Image (cartoon, helix red, strand yellow):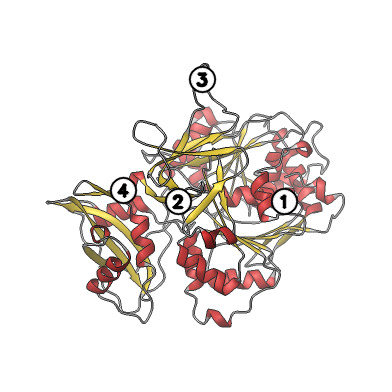
Amino acid sequence: MYPPSTARARPDAVAYVMAGSGERITYAELDRRSNRLARFWWSRGVRPGDSVVLVLENSLAWPVAVAAGMRSGLYVTPVNWHLKPTELAALIREDRPAAIVTSTALADRVVAAVADPSLDRTVIVCADGPADGCVALADALADQSSEPLERELLGARVLYSGGTTGRPKRFAQPLLGVHPADAPRRHSGLVDELGVGADSVLLSPAPNYHAAPFTFQLITLAAGGTVVCMEKFDAAGAMRAITEYGVTHSQWVPTMLIRLLNLPDRESIALSPRHRVAFTSGAPCPPHVKDAIFEWWGPVLHEYYGASEGYGHTYISPTDARSHPGSVGRPLGTARVHITDSTGADVGPGVEGTVCFEAADGPGRPAGASRPALKQMGDIGYLDDDGFLYLVGRRGFMIISGGVNIYPEEIESALLTHPAVADVAVVGVPDAEFGESVKAVVEVRPGASVSDDDLIAHAREHLAHFKAPRSVEFTTDLPRLPTGKLDKRRLVERFASPGAPADPRTERPTAPGTSTMSEDPSQQGERV
């Protein structure tokens, strides 16, 4: 992402636009503003190799801050702005940023988080106005030259993802020591499959601090395309944005697609002929959801799977999704997928095990090792005879009932095919006889009604009986992250913990509302 590359040829081209407000920034203005911010940081002692942390909602300040860091040799570190003050303070102490960009709504918790003598040189910029302990972005840029720094260096991305302990893990890409104009292409194989280029208009509906939106915004801006960023996801607004802004590419997680499919009278929504590529990641997309999207939008939905740490990716096209339903595809580029058993040995096609990535050139291989180091994110899956990968669940949330492993995702996918089900989560609950039993927590579509027995019978039609829920609870507010992923840890705490008090909001609804997207930083790994 180096704005001058596009600004020289197309200065008035729109780089970034906020879907709700319509606020936008051209490449020429992005170039000028990011230069000024880089120079402001330099005047405050920020140097290559330092970190800039973004504690910032989706806004027009986002691309300015990212571009400034990426052309200054900084580690650009977006963090979850939903973190509690103590969580944020711990993360900032670990990252030790020289600069932070935030907003007036979040400034108090950020200022409190840097109240540590070791962080006394940290400069905090407030994107949308003045705040105590911060420099307003407008003031920071006012007296700075719009010429680039004398020596520009490519910055690097840093991401925090959850771990098995729930503590966010820091993963930093290396600083390459090259000029930003010489930056290598990101995920070139995937970019080629999706056809991202200068004419691309990307709809980005998720929080920018997550790996996939952050990465694909960088990819689109590096190509000279336009990013259409939603302030906050809502299904109807997303469909309006696709048409209003001439979106060509859109990025989703499966829950967002389900909410699009649940829109009332969606058949009457006009579809934009420019929308030629949609792609989904973050969790396996159920085959029936893909089929419904294909029927509505045509064969435009692609899927990829990988780790935010960049271990490797798989990809499946709309055509292959028809012949290999439920798969997340085959490896891209030099990546290789292994399925291993509990001893770390590879297993054969059709056998479930831990999904691991290996790069073909074997980075990190110890001297004399017989095979490269394998990296995994806690996913369970298998390969078919054609080398297509299928995910069946997450090891951390696997249910063990009577000694049998049961994966919630498979049951959730089956229950979502019931016409009365709007949303569903499956957890294991303590069981005196079996250790754990399967419990489904269900949101019902507005105006629909369904019984426990109906849903259990439906599950038994599609699954082995031992996988079907033994109990069903109805709710109106399944906890989800802003990305749309189920917040599994909060689900377990709320619905499955022994002796957990009944939630007063939990009842059998006749016309439930939309589920809330709550936020918790403690996720095991992070798929992208």
Q: Amino acid at mark 3?
A: Pro
Circle 4: residue type:
Met
Q: Nearer the viewer, mark 3 or mark 1?
A: 3
Say which amino acid is labelled 2.
Tyr
Q: Is residue 343 in view from this perspective?
A: yes
Residue annotated with mark 3: 366
In the rendered image, residue 466, in percent from the top left (x then y), is placed at 23, 58
Q: Is residue 11 left or right of residue 352?
A: right
SS at mark 4 in the image:
loop
Nearer to us of marks 2 and 1 is 2
Q: Decide which of tag 3 and tag 4 comes sooner along the chain.
A: 3
Residue at mark 2: 390
Callout 2 touching callout 3 (CB < 8 Å): no
Closer to the N terminus: mark 1 or mark 4? Answer: 1
**Circle 1: is it few (<14), some (14-19), or many (20+) Cα within 10 Å?**
many
- Is mark 1 in CB contact (under 8 Å) with mark 4? no
**Pointer 4 local density, CA inside 10 Å: few below 14, some 14–19, many at least 20:** some
Q: Earlier in the sequence, mark 2 or mark 3?
A: 3
Closer mark to the observer between disc 4 and disc 2: 2
- For the residues labelled 2 and 1, the Cα–Cα distance comes to 32 Å
Counting every numbered tag in the picture gives: 4
SS at circle 2? strand
Whichever of labels 4 and 2 marks the residue nearer the N terminus, that label is: 2
* Residue under pointer 4: 398
Q: Tell me what residue is drawn at x 51 percent, y 71 percent.
A: 292
Disc 1 secondary structure class = helix
Residue picked out by circle 1: 221
Along the viewing direction, whichever of 415 and 96 lies nearer the viewer: 415
Look at label 1 and name its amino acid: Leu
